[in-house]
Amino acid sequence: MVYSDETEKVDFLIMHNFKKKRSCFEFAIRKEHLLVHYEAVFKKSSDKKYLLKMFEHYKKEHEAVSPLTVSFKEFRKSLPDEFYIDQEGNGVFVEGSEIAYFFYKKLSSFERFISAFMSYMLEQYDEIFFEVDDTDKAFEVFEKIIDYKREKSYDTYILELVNPV
């Protein structure tokens, strides 16, 4: 993994047959960055079934580029204790002003949920933080609801074998 503005490293990887497979974008959002302001009902939860939903979402979204290699028990240790859900099957795990993880059932309802949730967080914090991979379908949702200039990404390159066995 390498930042996109580290051009010497990127050029070296490309020259040696590495292909970019994913870009991870870091966001620092303020109220003025939100393009839409939906309302949605969500609540703080402690229901353990959402821990498994997050694990399954993370596993699915990373399978093609960097498959998850830890057990659910180990993954659970990385999740913040505070999480919020809505009735549509969407959720976020938060730690302070950071949306650490999110999951969704349908993108159409996720857009409403995440916009409302970010508005809620921005009532508590001047700025909120999160990351989104361009391989995650939710990336399109964030592009629609946020006006934010991304200057660099954290990219994953994978060696492409010329003559695989």
Image (spheres, rainbow, N blue to C red):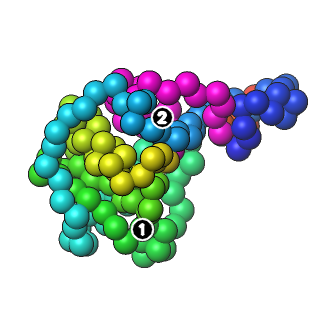
| Disc 1, SS | loop
The amino acid marked with disc number 1 is Pro
Relative to 123, is 29 above or below? above
Q: Which stretch did the figure color magenta? A: 130-154
Density class for disc 1 (Cα within 10 Å; few <14, some 14-19, many ≥20) is some
Residue 142 covered by magenta stretch:
yes
Q: Quadrant of residue 33?
A: top left
Q: From where the camera sits, is residue 4 visible?
A: yes
Q: Nearer the viewer, residue 91 or 52?
A: 91
Q: Which numbered disc covers residue 110? A: none
Q: Which residue is mark 1?
A: 80
Left or right position of 49 against 118: left
Q: CA distance from mark 2 to mark 1?
A: 23 Å
Q: Residue at x 31, y 63 (%)?
A: 83
Name the mark nearer the viewer: 2 or 1: 1
Q: Quadrant of the N terminus?
A: top right
For marks 2 and 1, the one nearer the N-term is 1
Look at mark 2 in the image and give the residue it sits on.
Answer: 135
Residue 94: x and y in percent read 39, 59
User: For the residue labelled by badge 2, is the local secondary structure a helix, a strand or a loop?
Assistant: loop
Residue 32 lies in what quarter of the image? top left
Quarter placement of the C terminus? top right
Q: Position of residue 152 (x, y in %)?
A: 66, 31
